[in-house]
Image (tube, grey):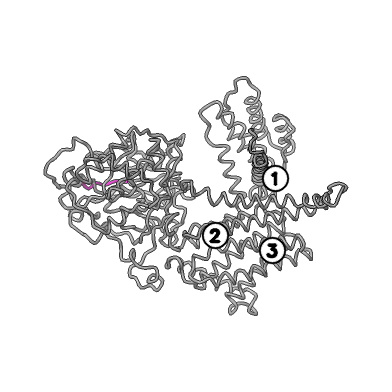
Amino acid sequence: MSGGARLTLCATAATFMAACALLPLVDLATWIFQAAFLLVVQAGVGALTRRVPLARPLTVAVQALVTLMLLTLLFANAQAIGGVLPGPEAFRHFGELLQAGGEDVGRFAIPAPLSDGIRLMLVGGVLVIGLAVDALAVTFRSAAPAGLPLLALYSVAAGLSHGSADWLWFLLAAGGYLMLLLAEGRDRLSQWGRVFGGTARSPGRAAESTADAVAPIRTGRRIGAFALGIALVVPLALPALEGGLLGPTGTGAGVGSGGGGTISAVNPLVSLQNSLNQPEDREVMSYRTNSKDTQDLYLRIVSLDEFDGTTWRPAKRSIIDVPSPFPSPRGLGADVRRTEIRTNIAAAGWYAQDWLPLPYPATKVDISGRWRYEPVGRTLVGDHNQTTRGKKYGVESLIVQPTAEQLANAPEAPSELRREFTKVPSSLPAIVEKTALRVTEGAANDYQRAVKLQDYFAVSGGFTYNTDVQAGSGSSAIARFLKDKEGFCVHFSFSMAAMARTLGIPARVAVGFTPGSPQADGRMSVGLRDAHAWPELYFEGVGWTRFEPTPNRGTAPEYTRDDTPAGNPSNPAAPSEAASPQPSAGQPSASDNCPAAERKLEGCSNTAPAVIGASGGDGPPFGTIALVALGVLLVVLVPLSPMLWRRRVRAVRLGSSGRTDGDAAARTLAAWLEVTDTAWDHGIAPDESQTPRKAAARIVRVGELDQVAADSVHRVAAAVEQVLYAPRPQPTAGLGDDVRRLEQGLHAKASRSARLRATLAPRSTVRVAWSLSQRWAELGSRWTARKSTLLRRARRPSGQEG
């Protein structure tokens, strides 16, 4: 088999193996056979056109045209011209199928029925990925970047479905990619010709020479198998690291678009830590309130109420139309003192995410746009791309003021609530429950136990608040935190909630913002560093109740302090609708308990899309996010991945300055690297043999830069020479602006095609391949050295000491 045929076969097989990860999403697997057949036809067309030969872009165009005709034959033959040529009617039918598929994925849970719309999305998506992989790996002979579309295909499946066979889908996808890389490597080696091993001195020596020729391929296979083993085993020992709830859409918060009412909720660890460590405390929102005391006015985004041992996340819930007013908070009795307040909130223009920050418990929200309501967590989520960006809204909420006596005398929570909110995974280390029992020893009731837990973390346990500690939410992370006694709000809230659950106290974690800081004009300003997480414990007769275990953050509630005043509760300001008992209004809707089989048959009333968790457990429902993710990842993100990677690198290099001279030097060198890469993207290849000054002059000359851009390049070069050679280098301000002026100058002089090439396919992205190649070589060297050491030890006589 020729090298090209082998590479074509491997590219098709790699796509098929990655596509298998989509199998759990639907209840019938027949679509995978259709996709496999069409992939083979698509690859065969590519092989034939390359034999003609046609120009590379023309080869891809022919494959795309044949792929479209195949999809037309399969899905729209009745509307096509001659049953195979797509016309206006066929494209209209495709649109109707995609629309129906979007409605289907928003209505059914995983595994969804294989409707025509869903089948078109699956088969069409796999063919688009197959075309991208074949074009990159075979037509353009660059197998390494072909991993990006394969990763996109696997990521969509892994993000929607989680189960016991996840490791198998990863193994298939990763194995297919490694097979593709090895096939390309073998093809490249074959082009070097026969390996010359010298004159054979004996028949045995000739065999040795042949073995040497195939050694690189064998080594590659061993390294690949070893890397797969590491990739499967290492994640078991690591805590989950996800995106966050607090950052803007696309950087951690609300990665979904809403899509008909479904929303994606993810682990807040990374975003919380990043927000707390920002050098600039950007204002997220501001508000005005008629409350006389704002210390308890936490702005809550969402509650994390499911803990599977890997991460805390929101449980799957139904969302409904926003009621007005909201139902009475579950568990809040009429004899508990409460005060109704009004708060007017204005979100910053840059702050865009799907969850609406609200005081808890809110009773009414006045806001424009498309929003949905989740009854159990009492949260509002955006629908159809609705975000908080620049939103102004009014909220009526309650300040609930229970007494210590009311909390201490709270009856046992309902059994169904205790079953859900006291679950702990079997993987939770015994030290967690053991510590909880030791800390709460002597407590007479759940309230006293909760206060003892809070005081243990915030006062008496010797814990230290530190935002630089590695984030983690899994079972091992909680045990490590209890041992090291150092962390930030995520560690404190997650640990207290887990310990409360081991004691039989219903608990969850809320994520949002502390009240912020007062301004001279009467506003309260909430910044990134006000991002926070805190535990909520349930007490029957009071409801979900905030506690504050994090030292130096927020305020401990009045009812948890020793000097809590006793007395008869009064309720002069309680609104009638809040005081009136509505035991069923705060309960989950009927669809919460509706089995998946009945949902498929539309046998449940009031079924609404669910608020989902991003990882762990049994996975999210197969919601509209599938359509959005497939459309964005397969059609937009994959072709634009070089541009997106380049922008990310530029943002990191030109980010905020460090705090030390060493940081300043690193930032200066990063700015110079950005100068050389920007010039490279515009066709001026870097020359490592030149000094910064000469390299800057070359960029100015070849790029024909104007005086402003030229001065900017020379300033960066001078800054680099200063940090490299000056006895005491000093930081230089404005390097980021200089780099941007250089880019503008190069853009102004470049042709339209050159500007498009620099933006969409920047040449400097080849550094990714260089980096991967270097790491691969280092791994191989270390493995070879380790293997040699083990062999020497194995051959050493038993009585000999090293």
Q: Which residue is mark 2?
A: 169
10 Å crowding of disc 2: few (<14), some (14-19), many (20+): many
Circle 1 — which element? loop
Task: Tell me if I can see residue 747 in this picture.
Answer: no
For residue 180: magenta?
A: no
Circle 3 — which element? helix
Q: Out of 210 and 376, give the one closest to the viewer.
A: 210
* Residue 772 in picture, x, y percent from top left: 64, 45
Circle 2 — which element? helix
Q: Out of 695 and 117, give the one closest to the viewer.
A: 117
Which quadrant of the view contains residue 275?
Answer: top left
Name the residue: 22% across, 48% down. Answer: 340
Q: Which residue is mark 1?
A: 750
Which quadrant of the view contains residue 526?
Answer: top left
10 Å crowding of disc 3: few (<14), some (14-19), many (20+): some
- The stretch of residues the image draws in magenta is 339-344
Q: Is residue 564 above or below residue 245?
A: above
* Residue 439 in picture, x, y percent from top left: 28, 39
Q: Which residue is mark 3?
A: 9
Name the residue: 51% across, 49% down. Answer: 235
Which quadrant would the N terminus be assigned to in this image? bottom right
Judged by its main secondary structure, the magenta piece is: strand
Q: Out of 112 and 516, give the one closest to the viewer.
A: 112
